[in-house]
Structure formats: C-alpha cells, structure tokens
Amino acid sequence: MRTIVMANHKGGTGKTTSCLNVAHALREQGHSVLMLDCDSQCNLTQSFTLPTPAGKRLDAVLLGQASLSDTVQEVGQGLYLIPSSPDLAEAEERIGKKPGAEFALKELLEEVEAIDFCLIDTPGGLGKLTYAALTAATAVFIPAQPEYYGIEGLVGLLDVCQQVQKRLNKDLKVGGLFFTQYNRSDRRRAQKDMVTLLETHPVFGPLVMRTTIRPNVALVEAQIEKESIFTWAGHSAGAQDYTALTAEILTRL
Ligand SMILES: Nc1ncnc2c1ncn2[C@@H]1O[C@H](COP(=O)(O)OP(=O)(O)O)[C@@H](O)[C@H]1O
Ligand SMILES: [Mg+2]
C-alpha cells in the first residue's frame, strides 16, 4: 500500500478537497483506496453519508478503544474511510502525551491488507496527527493557493518534512506542490508573481507540479451532495483537473 498525505499548515488550501477527489480518481482507475480523516473538523467524513457512532471512528482506534476493522467503513465500491469526529482533538492531545505518538498511524496502517492506496487528510496547523501522518507516509503533497502565501510558511512546512525524514520516516518523499483554485491563464499580478517565484525557486521549483486545480463550483456541489465528482459532473474542470493531478501524483511517488 502506498500512503499519500495532503498537508499544509494553512487552512482552506484544498487539502480535504484534494484527498477526496484524488481518492475518487484512483477508484475510477480501479484501485482500492482507504481514506483517513485526521482532522477533528471532519470535513472529509462529512463528504459521505455514514453513521459515525463512538467506537467507529479514528479517535476510538487511536485510544485503543476499537480495532482497525471496527472503524473502517466502506463508502463506495473499493473505497473505504476511517471517519473522524470533533472528539479527535481530545484523542490527539491524549496520545500526544505518550512516547512514540508519531508512530500511531504508521502502526495502525501496518494492519491494513490488500488496499492499493491510503490517502490521509490532515488539519491546518502542525499538530501531533500531522507528524503522525508524515511518519506513516510514502509521500506528502502540498496543495497551495498562490494568493495566500508568503514563501516563509512553505519553507517552514518543508523544514518539518525534513525533520520527519531525519528522525521519523527516512523514506518520506516530498512528492510535490500544486496550486489550487488557480488557473494558469489567471492574469492577477499577485498570483502570477507568487507562482513564478515558486517555479523559479531553487528548492521549490522542482516540487511545483504541472497540474493546477482550477476554481470549479462542481467540486463544491459534489461534496455537498456527497457524490463523486466523476458521477456528479464527469466532464467538469474539477473532474479533469483531479484526473490529471492523480496521474501526475502517480509519476512522483
Ligand atoms: N478547486 C476548487 N474550486 C472551488 N472551490 C474549492 C476548490 N477547492 C476547494 N474549494 C473550496 O474551498 C474551501 C476550502 O477547501 P478545503 O479542501 O476544505 O481546504 P482545507 O482542507 O485545506 O482546509 C472548501 O469550501 C472547498 O469546497
Ligand atoms: Mg480540510
């Protein structure tokens, strides 16, 4: 199983949207996919219709109150989710006080059998669960909105990835950075300047991915309707962009 983490300490950059749609795109290609909702705001969980009683969620399994098989729920053919709830915040704090908390997700995922890909959605901020996700990852991908960024924030995020590589997961690959809610024909100055700055930057340049995710309301609608973008609006820009992004991710794993 290959584990892909979407991470960016800023909120609202498209982590959840990308997790969800890359998972659906991998499913479209016939892969089996497990999603892990590591955000106590549980937007990924809310993108599916499913009961999430205590004992069937990530917080329970992290606290040793449930097993992995109790918590994995099938949300589509070959598509699985370990859901979360607001209680995850407290569970994160509790496991964070124990030694080796960074390995919690890695150990959990070692139990998973016969799944091709795992996609982990992380919260904003850089808490224990984000470290745990990076420790469990094959590769991390960074969704970023050009207008929101000072480059310093991204430098800090890369620094965290390097610390994880050094101390917790030497195999972690920084797979790439992609722009969300951005169109390459966008003429707005601030956005263009930020994109150019990153593309020509000695460290970030090689990480910047070709695919950008354009602003597309169908992505928002599909999530609200709890449908895959590929059944909701299969010809939309959102469906096209996430198909392209998924193909590019596969070349960078
Ligand atoms: N390509 C897009 N086009 C339009 N809206 C988007 C797009 N990507 C994300 N959004 C919306 O932007 C908001 C933030 O995205 P989200 O994926 O939840 O970010 P994060 O998980 O990083 O906080 C959500 O309301 C989402 O529906
Ligand atoms: Mg999110």
Image (cartoon, rainbow, N blue to C red):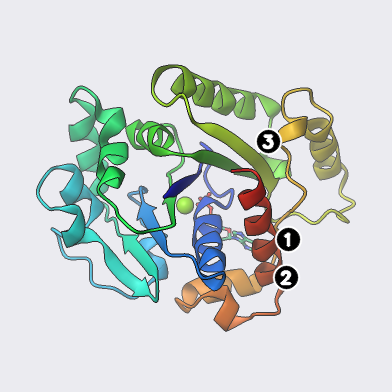
Q: Secondary structure at mark 2?
A: helix
- Residue 208 lies left or right of residue 155; in this view the side is right
Q: Quadrant of residue 195?
A: top right
Q: In what element is the residue under mark 1?
A: loop
Mark identifier at residue 149: 3
- Foreground pick, 137 / 101: 137
Going by the picture, which residue comes out furthest to the left?
65
Dot 2 and dot 1 residues touching (CB under 8 Å): yes
Residue 162 at x, y percent in the picture? 53, 21
Vertical placement of residue 114 versus 249, above or below: below
Which residue has dot 2 on it? 237
Question: Label 2 to label 1, Cα distance in Å?
Answer: 7 Å
Crowd tier of the residue under label 1, counting other residues whose Cα lies within 10 Å: few below 14, some 14–19, many 20 or above: some
Distance, label 1 to label 3, CA atoms, is 17 Å
Indicate yes or no: mark 1 CB to ligand 1 under 8 Å.
yes
Of mark 2 and mark 1, the one earlier in the sequence is 1
Image x and y of residue 59, in percent? 21, 48
Looking at the picture, which amino acid does disc 3 mark? Tyr
The image's mark for residue 155 is none
In this rendered view, identify the residue nearer to me: 234 or 218: 234
For mark 1, what is the residue? 214
Q: Name which of mark 2 and mark 3 comes first in the sequence.
A: 3
In the displayed structure, 156 sits above or below 220; it is above
Q: Residue at x 43, y 65 (%)?
A: 32
Callout 1 amino acid: Arg
Residue closest to the eye, 11 or 208? 208
Q: Nearer the viewer, mark 2 or mark 3?
A: 2
Q: x and y percent of residue 13 in the render?
A: 59, 48
Query: Disc 1, disc 3: CB below 8 Å?
Result: no
Between marks 2 and 3, how big is the CA–CA gap?
Answer: 24 Å
Query: Image height check: is 208 above or below 83?
Result: above
